[in-house]
Image (cartoon, rainbow, N blue to C red):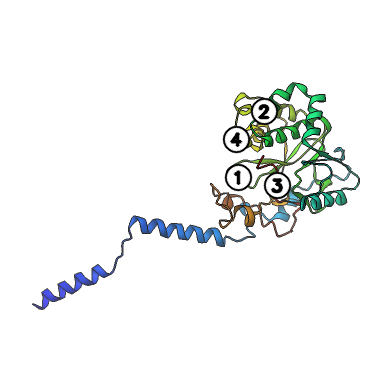
Amino acid sequence: MIMAKNSTAGRASASSIRLPRSTTERIVALFVIAVGLFALWPLNHFSRGNDPCEVAEKNDLNNVDSKLPKIIHHQWRTDPITEEPHRSWYLKKLALFPDHQHIIWTDDKIRRFLQEKHAWFLPQFDGYKQNISRVDAARYFILYEYGGLYMDMDYEPLVNFWAQLPDDKPAVVQSPFYCFEQTQNSFMSSPAKHPFWNVLIQVLMQPERANSRNPLYAAGPQALDEAVVSFFGGAYILPCENWNRANLMSSFHFLRHLSPCVSYFIRPCGNIHDNKCQYGIHHGASVYASV
């Protein structure tokens, strides 16, 4: 009788301790852990452990006698710019680069430019499914024709970085959103008439891109990526640690926007709010995203 009682008690004790978890419980636990890691990931973490000042020193051009044309191109709906905070960012560009020619390209001005210089491209230009693709494509023709620097209106320079731009080849900024694109067309510089842009224009002419509804693929960063890979002479890549840190707290933090990939962990490029060896901030205001 005593042995029977002990056996029953043992079975009762074992049933009260649920060591193995169900599949659902395991999934929930993993989700909670993942969300916790995502929320608490150190905001000063840099991709592959790169310190931004070490990256800057390694890529220091110190091109004080740069022959890059002193032209800075901007795109906006209207000229003059009256909307904030874009007006403040534009005024900051004027203050940091007072010796440069600043050109504001409105949609009307872009169309007149293409009509005069590259009218053959207008059928494809007009055929794009979204206006952002027309805006993207125009940047490449502008830099080919005039050279200089293109900056998105929501890019805020922190210093005069002209000496850090190459004057013998195009430079494009590295993207922090690694799973979408390798580079971005939000910040690009180039000598005038450089053959790199001919390669990129050939990429744009691919029928599948011309008819695509995906702006990244049609004329955006993914088209730029293909040209960077295809161009034999290469292009200078501006490291995202110094030029293009992601605004993770506003754009990719899980409370604001769930990214379809884990680029937050793959290439965060640093804390956008820490100005350590940071030349400029791309605020990601998505000026043309809704048009």
**Can you tell which of label 3 and label 2 is closer to the viewer?**
2
What whole-number distance in Å separates the C-alpha atoms at marks 2 and 4? 13 Å
Indicate the amino acid at tag 3. Pro
Within-10-Å neighbours for mark 1: few <14, some 14–19, many 20+: some
What percent of the width, then of the height, locates residue 126?
Answer: 70, 27
> Which residue position is annotated with label 2?
204
Name the one closer to the observer, 63 or 222. Answer: 222
**Can you tell which of label 4 and label 3 is closer to the viewer?**
4
Question: Which residue is at 60% across, 33% downward?
Answer: 213
> Which residue position is annotated with label 3?
239
Residue 143 visible here: no
Name the one closer to the observer, 105 or 279. Answer: 105
Query: Which quadrant of the figure has residue 203?
Result: top right
What percent of the width, then of the height, locates residue 68?
Answer: 85, 38
**Can you tell which of label 3 and label 1 is closer to the viewer?**
1
Indicate the amino acid at tag 4. Asn
Tell whether label 1 touches label 4 (CB within 8 Å).
Answer: no
N-terminal label among 1 and 2: 1
What whole-number distance in Å separates the C-alpha atoms at marks 4 and 1? 17 Å
Residue 278 visible here: yes
Q: Which mark is residue 214?
A: 4
Q: Is residue 50 above or below residue 125?
A: below
Q: Which mark is residue 142?
A: none
N-terminal label among 2 and 4: 2
Helix, strand or loop status at disc 2: helix
